[in-house]
Image: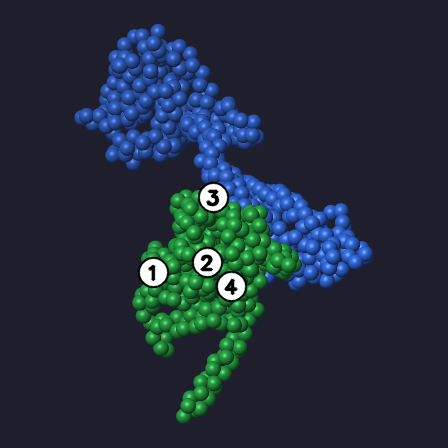
Amino acid sequence: MAVSLRVRLIWQLLALAAVLALGLYLAVRIGAERASEATLDAVLGAAAQGMAEEMRSEEGGVVIDVPPGTFSMLAAMGEERIFYRVDVGGMTVTGYGDLPLPAVPPTALAPVFYSVPFRDADVRVAAVARSIRLDGVATKALVLLGQTREGQDQIAERLGNRAAALGLAVFLVAIPLSLLVARGLTRPIDRLAEAVGRRGPRDLRPVRHPAPAELQPFVGALNTFIGRLRGTLSQTETFIAEAAHHIRTPLAVMRNDAELALRHSGEEMTRARLRGLIRSADDAARSAGQLLDHATVLYRADQAERAPLDLAQLTRAVADRLAPAAEMKDIDLRLTIEAPLPAEGDAVLVEAALRNIIDNAIKYSDADSLVEIIARAAGGKAEITVADRGRGLSGLTHDRLKRRFLRGANVGDVAGSGLGLTIVEEATTAMGGQFTLSPREGGGTCAILSLPLSLS
Amino acid sequence: MRHLVLALVLVLSAILSQARVAAGFEIEDERSFGPAGAPQLRLLSTTDIAILQPVITAWLQANPDSGLHYVMASSQEVYRAIAEDRAAFDVVISSAMDLQMKLANDGFARPLPAEAMASQPQWARWRDLLVAVAQEPVVLILADGALASPAEAPRTRRDLITLLRDNPDRFRGKVGSYDPAISGAGYLFVAQDARLSDTFWRLAEVMGRLDARLYCCSSDMINDLQAGRLLVGYNVLGSYAVAHGGKGFQIVELEDFTLTLLRTALIPQNAPDPDGAAAFLRFLLSAPGQDLISEGAGLPSVEEAAFERKPHLRPIRLDPGLLANLDDVTRQRFLDEWRAAMVQP
């Protein structure tokens, strides 16, 4: 899995905070150094100029005043070390004769500042030049005054450290903040994922969940994908329905022809073959019908058109329609129907579900038996029970039986596609109802379809 | 036999003086403490051996395996030994603050143990290179016979000037002070005097008119005073005055200001045993060490409260301002002025 967006965001924010802290440190450090250097240079320069100005020529030589107060002052900040040198006419008169001279000789107007290493220390020197009259000759005098700048460095470092600490504090505050921001930013994604995840397995409607502009391309792509999927699915279903439909007509023609042939044939062997042919045609037609039913159920479940309907009436109608098939096996359909049972739903779906349940009951019952159909209201729901004395479920669970194209182990000679219970299940789910299949006490199966009653 | 002994003494003294010349600087006294053969801490100091002996004894009792070699020299020689000869010493203690400052400023000192420095007040140390181990007032001493009546006792320099000027016959040739030309400490005192007050120059003139005698050291001044050759000693180290028991003279702290000297210690850059030196300094700066200096040796310990008790005490500022005093040109000019004041035509 790629690095999570949240983690990536946090790292980026933290990196930004670190860069900020470092930048702040450097900016303050350099700023403080520049500012204090300018200030200290001004003081040092003034002191050097003061010393140069105090120089005067007297009988017998130059008088130089080395002012203790000035030295104390220059050394005060950070207990600096002080070095000085006075040259007159190119000769060192007093001070440290080895204190290096400036690279550029200073003018009389402004001191020259430079930094040199001297006696194991970095010394900042101000050099001032002036002209002094010595024995009637103008002689060049040079005053160098130097100080270490350790106090300045310490202050700059302290300020820099303080700024870095501030930056670090920002950095530390940024951690929970970036977590918060990251969470806030990824929340719409979570919500969208939740909304998509909550959908039913067959819900292929486009995603209409509100999403921020940045997520719109994703939602758009998702919707396009859903659209394509839906198109493919409906195409497949339409194809199956068409195919089933197209098969049914030639099957009916074939069956008719076979029946006609049976009627006209006197030869017993041929008749037996024809009867088998008719039965096969019936099975094929039934399978095609179920395929059609299944496709219809899937299609309509998606559309989910709801209209008021009376379940009592519907049950009766389906039972009536299947009565001939029951009669053929001498099966008694006993209806116990409470009327009315108003509900909302797609009549076609409910009909398909009921038809498959009752058909199954008839199909798997022995001749001369009883199939009970009870429709009644129970706890705000309409409950339609179809109970037979057939061969039962042979131990298979209801869940397994509902799978597509899966049939019980005891189906034996009975023709079937394995789609019946799948159709019932899907239709019921689409209507918001429930379908249970359980073994009946005393043998047989009990199928219960319950659908919500409408309130009115 | 007598000749032989004399010859031996001569040879010995020749060897000794040879040794002293080889050292490159002039030493006044030296002594070894501790067991023979033990590693010796080399201490160079301007202080008389007798004054620091109690502290040294206590130190050696605490460190029985080590010895200590004490070399005493004048402050100028102490400076020369370190700055010019790069002589191998572990600890340098000197009363010449300016010379000590110059040693530290010019990079001859190495950092002292931080924890020992932290306990010292700001005015008693400079950077981590120089630390005061004792503070002592620079006082005026008056022989018992100097005053005709107690009312004459001077309290300020102005009083002293009046006393001397009004009694020239009594004080002629009987006033003593340092010769700043030969004594580093003496030069430091007069330079600080001159910096703090103009009355100093008037005092110098008065002393010059009275044919003041000039000394190299406090102890000589006190000895002459006790011997009756002097009546007044100006700018005498308080500790020496106290060490001489105050017999035959009284100690006066002048109330216009009394300079307070800091006896400072440093560890030279080329100390053979810097760790031992640090340990010794730590001992000197510790409470028992300070007590020993204060009580046993008679040197007042470094104490901030003294300045509150006696507002006239002025500590000599331990900072590079002291370097200005040492500037050759400035020093020469100052000494010229001083001589002009002292030597009356």
Q: Which marked residue is nearer to the observer: mark 4 or mark 1?
A: 4
x then y, percent, for residue A31 = 61, 42
Mark 3 surroundings: few (<14), some (14-19) or many (≥20) residues within 10 A = few
- Colour blue maps to chain: A
Q: Amino acid at mark 3?
A: Met
Q: Mark 4 falls within which chain?
A: B
Q: Mark 3 falls within which chain?
A: A
- Residue identifier under label 2: B231
- Colour green maps to chain: B
Q: CA distance from mark 4 to mark 2?
A: 14 Å
Q: Which marked residue is nearer to the observer: mark 3 or mark 4?
A: 4
Q: Which marked residue is nearer to the observer: mark 2 or mark 3?
A: 2
Q: CA distance from mark 2 to mark 3?
A: 101 Å
Q: CA distance from mark 4 to mark 1?
A: 27 Å
Q: Secondary structure at mark 2?
A: loop
Q: CA distance from mark 3 to mark 4?
A: 93 Å
In this orientation, which residue lies closer to the viewer: A229 or A4? A4
Upstream in sequence: badge 4 or badge 1: 4
Q: Amino acid at mark 2?
A: Leu
Q: Which disc number belongs to residue B215? A: 4
Residue B288 position (above or below residue A70): below
Indicate left or right for A371 with B116 as reference.
left
